[in-house]
């Protein structure tokens, strides 16, 4: 286990919203009152997957937008799912959207897309530009939405800042937490993230996706401030990782922790069922093929009892719960 300045995050502010944009704020409640798409309740393949939902006919197969991250608001009656707009490398993603999913009636889920944007200044005119990250993981802490920025760290959004803009809803970036420059290929990648607790303390779990031939991936923990939902800073204004675990499972897609027990999702290739890992860094139990093909991020709805995950591939796109009580060994603790 390694820690140090190379893993410390520092806060960076975003440009403030203009008065014109602030006047259009409707918040998450405004989106929930204006949902325009119908999902479908459905069974989901995989021994660890409970009955979940899928998208409407267009979103299920859309080749441009790919689901990645998931987060629960409250106890899971509302879910947020991140999608990135796919473009050919080396071009960055074409943008990010968040699906706000209302599961108040689990048999009739409804949702609407909200684009993530960043305030910017076009000469003489304040504007809002696309957020071009992979958004491989998201987390909700109170009113704060944290979005993984693979190469830089974490982007910060406030759910109360959702704007109604012409015929769409957008959510402007409010800030960021960034890694220091340098460290070359061993710079920590923020492939995914989730909010949980470790030994009774709010924590942000971050992990790397690496293929079999790549350097061994890592998992890291950062403390969260329960009052703000933001990474907690020390006297030097930095957020230091108390734990960084090397040599973790390849092809990790999501991680979550509650108490002393960790859960990982890992993909195994297109059309192949994914794996669920339970335990802790250095003492994993691997449940091969327990997840559907293409598993992505993990997020708690009921900490220690129910996780949510999503899958990404067109034609096989589901949002589903995992009853972790079935998969946790007594020796894993709470």
Image (tube, rainbow, N blue to C red):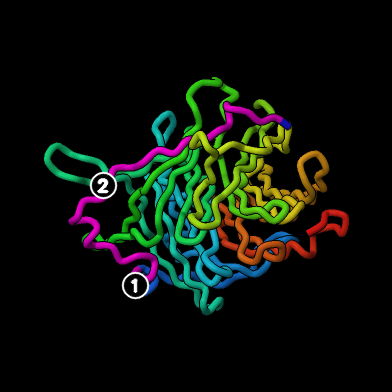
Q: Is residue 183 left or right of residue 126?
A: right
For the point 80% across and 45% down, the residue is 284
Q: Quadrant of the C terminus?
A: bottom right
Task: Tally the marks.
Answer: 2
Q: Position of residue 264 (x, y in %)?
A: 70, 48
Say if residue 228 shows up in the picture: yes
| Pointer 2 residue | 128
| In the rendered image, the vertical position of residue 246 relative to residue 321, given as above or below | above
Does the magenta portion include 165?
no
Query: What secondary structure is marked by label 1?
Result: loop
Q: Position of residue 23 (x, y in %)?
A: 22, 62
Q: Is residue 147 left or right of residue 316?
A: left
In the displayed image of the protein, which residue is found farthest to the front?
A: 235
Q: Position of residue 134 (x, y in %)?
A: 47, 42
| In the rendered image, the vertical position of residue 275 relative to residue 6, given as above or below | below
Q: Which portion, as a residue range, is magenta?
A: 2-30
Name the one closer to the observer, 145 or 4.
Answer: 4
Q: Position of residue 43 (x, y in %)?
A: 64, 69
Q: Give the CA separation, mark 2 to mark 1.
A: 22 Å
**Other residues around mark 1 within 10 Å, as few (<14) / some (14–19) / many (≥20):** few
In the displayed image of the protein, which residue is found farthest to the left?
A: 124
Q: Are marks 2 and 1 in contact (CB under 8 Å)?
A: no
| Pointer 1 residue | 34
Say if residue 63 shows up in the picture: no
Name the one closer to the observer, 305 or 134.
Answer: 305
For the point 64% across and 70% down, the residue is 51
Q: Quadrant of the N terminus?
A: top right
For the point 62% across and 60% down, the residue is 300
Does the magenta portion include 8?
yes
**Other residues around mark 2 within 10 Å, as few (<14) / some (14–19) / many (≥20):** some
| In the rendered image, the vertical position of residue 248 relative to residue 325, given as above or below | above
């Amino acid at each position: 286990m390694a820690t140090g300045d190379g893993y410390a995050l520092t806060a960076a502010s975003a440009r403030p919203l203009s008065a014109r944009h602030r006047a259009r704020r409707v918040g998450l409640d405004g989106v929930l009152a204006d949902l325009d798409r119908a999902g479908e309740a459905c069974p989901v393949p995989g021994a660890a997957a409970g009955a979940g939902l899928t998208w409407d006919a267009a979103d299920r197969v859309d080749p441009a937008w790919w689901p990645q991250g998931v987060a629960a608001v409250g106890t899971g009656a509302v879910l947020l799912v991140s999608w990135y707009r796919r473009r050919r490398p080396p071009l960055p993603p074409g943008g990010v959207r968040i699906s706000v999913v209302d599961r108040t009636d689990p048999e009739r889920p409804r949702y609407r897309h909200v684009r993530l944007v960043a305030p910017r200044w076009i000469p003489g005119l304040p504007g809002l530009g696309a957020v071009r990250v992979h958004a491989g993981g998201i987390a909700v802490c109170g009113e704060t939405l944290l979005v993984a920025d693979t190469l830089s760290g974490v982007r910060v959004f406030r759910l109360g800042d959702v704007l109604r803009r012409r015929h769409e809803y957008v959510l402007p970036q409010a800030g960021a937490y960034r890694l220091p420059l340098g460290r070359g290929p061993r710079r920590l990648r923020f492939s995914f993230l989730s909010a949980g607790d470790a030994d009774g303390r709010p924590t942000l779990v971050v992990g790397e996706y690496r293929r079999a031939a790549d350097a061994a991936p890592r998992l890291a923990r950062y403390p969260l401030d329960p009052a703000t939902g933001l990474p907690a800073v020390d006297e030097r204004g930095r957020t230091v990782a108390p734990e960084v675990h090397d040599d973790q499972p390849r092809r990790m897609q999501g991680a979550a922790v509650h108490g002393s027990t960790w859960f990982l999702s890992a993909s195994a290739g297109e059309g192949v069922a994914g794996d669920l890992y339970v335990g802790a860094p250095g003492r994993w139990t691997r449940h091969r093929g327990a997840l559907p093909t293409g598993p992505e991020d993990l997020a708690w709805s009921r900490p220690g009892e129910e996780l949510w995950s999503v899958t990404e591939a067109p034609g096989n796109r589901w949002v589903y719960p995992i009853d972790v009580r079935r998969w946790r060994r007594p020796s894993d603790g709470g």
